[in-house]
Amino acid sequence: MMESMRNLAKTFVAKIMLGLLVVAFGLWGITGVAGSAFESIACIVGFCPSDLAQVGSVTIKGDEFTNMMQRQIRNMAQQTGQALTLDDARKMGVNAQVLDAMIAQAAVTQSVKKLGLSVSDKDLQSDLISNKQFQDKSGKFDIQAFRSALANSGLSEQQYFANQRRVHTEQAIVNSASNELALPKTLSDALNQYEGETRDVKYFDVTATAADTVAPTDADLQAQYQKNPATYTAPEYRTGVVMVADAATIASAQKVSDDELQKAWEQHKGEFGTPEKRTIIQLSFKSVDDAAKAKARIAAGEDIMKIAAENGLKESDILQTEKLREDFLDKAIGDAAFALKEGEVSEPVQGALATALLKAVKVIPAVNPTFEQSKAELTQKVQLEKAKAALQEVYNTVEDARAKNLKLEDIAKTQGLNLIVVPPISASGQNPEGADISATISPEALKAMYTSDVGVDNDAIQVGDGFIWYDVRSVIPSALKPFDQVKDKVTADVVAARIRQAAIDKAKAIVTALQGGKSLDEAAKDASATVKTISALKRNQQSEDFDGRELAAAFSVPDQGFAFSAGGDGKSARIMQIVKDTMPVVDMKNSDFTKARDQIQGGFINDLQSGLVDDLKKSAGVKLNNDLWKLVNNGEAPAVE
C-alpha cells in the first residue's frame, strides 16, 4: 500500500512541475503580494507569522500549504482505496513534495507577473464553450452543466474565469520551454525499427531436478543461514484482546414490545415480500397508425417477433425481463404493461418517449406476507434499529468502566459484548507457524494493535456503526529463528537454488554446442525435448509462451544466433534460435511507434519544462519560514532552491 502511495506522490509532483495538475475546478493558487501597508511594515524583517515561503514577490501562506496537503492526502486515499493519515504522508515525504510543487508554481506565477501576461475574456469564453466537460450529447455548450460544476466546486463564475486566466498564462510560460518539440528523424526511424522489429524463434525447454545437483552439506546449510538472516527471521508478533460493540452484537438483547412491532409494521410492511414483476415485449413504432397495423396483424395470428424481425430487431432488443413498474422510464408504457394479462398484447400505447405495442410474456405476482408471517424478520429489524440508537449509551458505559481500570474481559462479560482473545499475530496477519489468522480480528484492530503498546490506554476505534476497544497484552520481538527450527526451509532453499543453476548450466552447455555447429533439432533430441516455433515476436509483447526474460534473450543476439533464458518456475531453462529477423518499413502512424514516440517525447518535454521551472525558482529567489514549517510539519525544513 505504502509503495503505491509513494508512486502516486511522485506522479503528483511531476504533474505540477509540468503545469498539468491545474484543472478547471478544485484549484489552488498563490496569494501573491496582497496585504495591507501595516502588514508590509510588520513583515519587513523576516516572515509574517502566516507566511510559509516567499518566491520573489509571491507569498505562499501556511494555510494554503495545509489545504493542499489535505487535498493531496484525500486524492491519494481515493485512488488507492486506503486510508492515509497526515503522519503517513509526512513519512512518505509528501509534505516536502507539495511544498516543492507550490514553490514551482509560485515561480511561474512570478514570471507571469514580471512579463505582464494575460488572456482576453473572448479567448476564455471560447475555451469554456469548447470544453467537453460542459457539452451535451450533441456537442453544444450546456450552461446548466457549467453552473452545476461551479456549484459542486464552490466557485463563482468570476473565480472560475480568474483561475482559468491564471492557468492559461502559467501554462504559456511552462510550455514555452518545449513548444514545437519534435524528435529528430534519425531517432524516430530508429525508434520505429526498435518497436516494430519482429523475430521468428525456434525453441525447446530443458528441466533439472534434485538428481542433477549435489546434496548440500551441513556447512552449505550453515552458510545459507548465515548469509541470509532476513529470510529466516521471524517478524514481530503481538497478543491482545479486542472487544466489539456494534448494532449486530447487541441487537438480540434489545426488547421489543407488541406495540412497537405494530407501529414498525405500519411503517415498513412495504419492505416485506416482493413486488409484482413482468417480462414484457416492447415493440416501438414511428406512429400510432404503424402500431395499429401491426396490432391487426397480430390479432390475425401473426407472431410479434416476425414483425420485430421485419424491423431489424432481435428478441434481446425488445424483451425486458422481470421488470418492476418503476423500471419503465415512460410512465404510460409502464402502466399499460402492468395492466395486461399474461400473454395479452396491448393496443397502441402512445407514451412520452415512444409509441409501442406491448406483450406480457410472463407475470410474476406480488408476494405480500401477513404481519404474523413477517413477525420474526420484523422483530430483528426493530432490534437492530434500537441497537443502533443504544450504541452511544453502550459506549459511555464501557468508557466509564475503563475509567475505573476494569479489564476488557470483565466489561465484555457484564455488558454481553463480543470479546476476542488475539493469539500471537504478525502485522500481516500470520501466526508463528505461518498460517493466515487475519480473520481473527478486523483490519482496523490489527493495525491499531501495531501502533500501540503494552500498558497503553487506547481510545476506542469507530468502525461503521460500532466501536472496537483493544489492549496489547504482549510484544514478541522480531528475532532470527534458531537454525534447527528452520533447517528444513534452509535445505529447501539451497536445493531450489541448485536446481535453478543446474537448469541454467544445461542451457549454457547446449548453446555452446549449438554455436559449435550442432543443430537445434539434434540438441533437442539429445535432451528428449520437442522443438517449437513461434512467429512475429515483438520485444515488448509478453505472452503465456514468452515472458519478459525470454523476450529479452530472444532480442539479445543477432539473426540466426542462439540464446537461453532461465524459466520462471525455477527448474527449467529455454534454448532458442532466431530463424528470421524482420525490420519494419518506417510507419509514423503505427500505434506501437506513436506510443513509444509520445513516451520519449514526453520525457524530453518533462526535462525541458522542469529545467525552466528550476531556473525560474533560482531567478525569483526562494525563502522558507523554517519556524512555521517546523510548527506545521513537526520536523526540520527541507532544503529549497
Image (cartoon, rainbow, N blue to C red):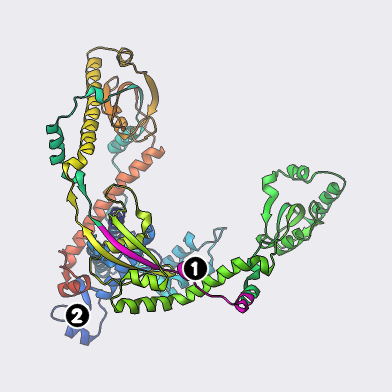
Residue type marked 1: Phe
Mark 2 / mark 1, whichever is N-terminal: 2
Looking at the rendered image, the quarter that the C terminus falls into is bottom left
Name the foreground residue: 195 vs 266: 266
Which image quadrant for residue 155?
bottom left
Name the foreground residue: 147 vs 122: 147
Range drawn in magenta: 238-262
In the picture, the disc for residue 313 is none
Percent x, y of residue 158: 42, 75
Percent x, y of residue 109: 27, 68
Which image quadrant for residue 86?
bottom left
* 482 on left or right of 133: left
Residue that carries the numbered disc 1 in the rendered image: 146
Residue 73 in sight from this viewpoint: yes
Label 1 sits on a secondary structure element that is helix
Looking at the rendered image, the quarter that the N terminus falls into is bottom left
Residue that carries the numbered disc 2 in the rendered image: 48
